[in-house]
Amino acid sequence: MSTIPALGVPRARAWRTRVRRARRRHRDRSLGDTLTDLYMLWWLVVVYGGAFVSTVREHLRAPAGTRVEQTEVVVDNVERAVRRIVPPGELDQISDNIGSPAFSYVLAFYQTDSIGPQDADILISLKPGHHPTVGYERQIRQTIEREFPGVMVYFQAADIVSQVLNFGLSAPIDAQISGQKLEQNYATARRLEDLMRGIPGLTDVRIAQGLDYPTLRVNVDRTKALELGVGGRVGADGAGELADAHALERPCDALAAAELHGASALAHASLRQVNRELIESERKLTSPQGLPGRPWYKHEIYAPGMYTGYGVKTLPAVREAIEQRQWGQAGTEIVVVGKILDGEAAVIDSAANDLENAVR
């Protein structure tokens, strides 16, 4: 969204009106018309510059492999730094989208460079009459480079016009390297990145793809593990470990046991009841009264944000109440969401029990 500063604009409009009237009297002076338009363009850009833009869209990327809760801590610290830079009288609000969305189809509705839990989109809204955003962006870059080593930050188009002109890309200039060998392509891109940094006027030069994400793959033959009375499980810390079968999720154990017996164990099971419970599990995440201020959204776990357009918000009623500092409403919504999650857990436990009994 763009805003026009109030100071000086009425005077400019009056001046342009006088110029248009002069045009009607002297229609053959096309050169003067052109010079007038160029002068108005220069006046708008030089005199007001970035003061027209009232929203700053910042993308933050922590080191590869950072867990989402650690990224949230980094984003909180960056928000504090932003509040030190932007005066309280000019800052309206700050909204965050941390990590990649749970459902990939959400990416069709808004542009983001988020590829994992180390990424975050930060939307900074400013009040009318603020100072030019270019200066704030410069200060934010310098502060993050100085206070947050290893964290990369760059700014993207926040207004719809620039996003359309970028054709959905995250920057107006997009250089792509293609070839048969990924390592050589990446090395070429790094050299091109260094050269582009030397071009005057270019800022936020970066390579969007990250190839340094730490990965540990542990393959466990679940059938063999069940024959031995144990099951394979990958822990939250990324390390493979062996645990007894009761430590695994019961639906997975039940399906693996059925596969071990050629799926014959499921032939006599009442899978219809299990399917009904699984369908009901998604419906349990909705509330009849809907979200505060927009009751047509019934889902309490995720929904489009109130201020983020189609950008998804998890636990929207709770998060938005906290972001707006409406503590009473936040407490009420926490109770509502807690009851919904308790109901969801009960449905999942019931389905797990039915599935486990079906293969005994």
Image (cartoon, rainbow, N blue to C red):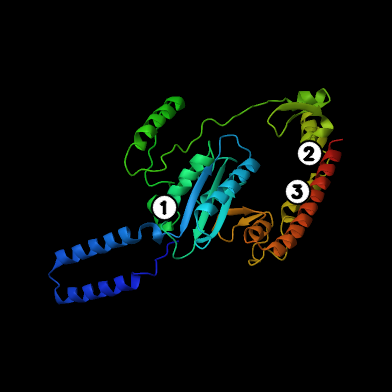
Picture residue at 72% right of the left edge, 55% below the top: 285
Q: Nearer the viewer, residue 214 or 136?
A: 136
Amino acid type indicated by mark 3 = Leu
> Which secondary structure lies at badge 2?
helix
In the picture, measured across the screen, residue 241 lies left or right of residue 229, that is left
Judge the density around disc 1: few (<14), some (14-19), many (≥20) Cα neighbours within 10 Å. Answer: few
How far is the residue under mark 3 from the one under mark 2?
Answer: 12 Å
Q: Position of residue 330 (x, y in %)?
A: 70, 60
**Residue occupied by mark 1:** 135
**Residue occupied by mark 3:** 278
Sequence-first tag of 1 and 3: 1
Sequence-first tag of 2 and 1: 1
Q: Which mark is residue 357?
A: none
Picture residue at 15% right of the left edge, 64% below the top: 31
Query: Farthest residue in the left direction?
Result: 28
Q: Position of residue 99 (x, y in %)?
A: 59, 44
Q: Which of the 4 image quarters holds residue 301?
A: bottom right
Judge the density around disc 3: few (<14), some (14-19), many (≥20) Cα neighbours within 10 Å. Answer: some
Sequence-first tag of 3 and 2: 2
Amino acid type indicated by mark 2 = Pro
Q: Position of residue 304 (x, y in %)?
A: 59, 57
**Residue occupied by mark 2:** 251
Q: Nearer the viewer, mark 1 or mark 3?
A: 1
Q: Nearer the viewer, residue 30 or 230?
A: 30
Amino acid type indicated by mark 1 = Gly
In the displayed structure, 14 sits above or below 198; it is below
How far is the residue under mark 1 from the one under mark 3?
Answer: 53 Å
How far is the residue under mark 2 from the one under mark 1?
Answer: 55 Å
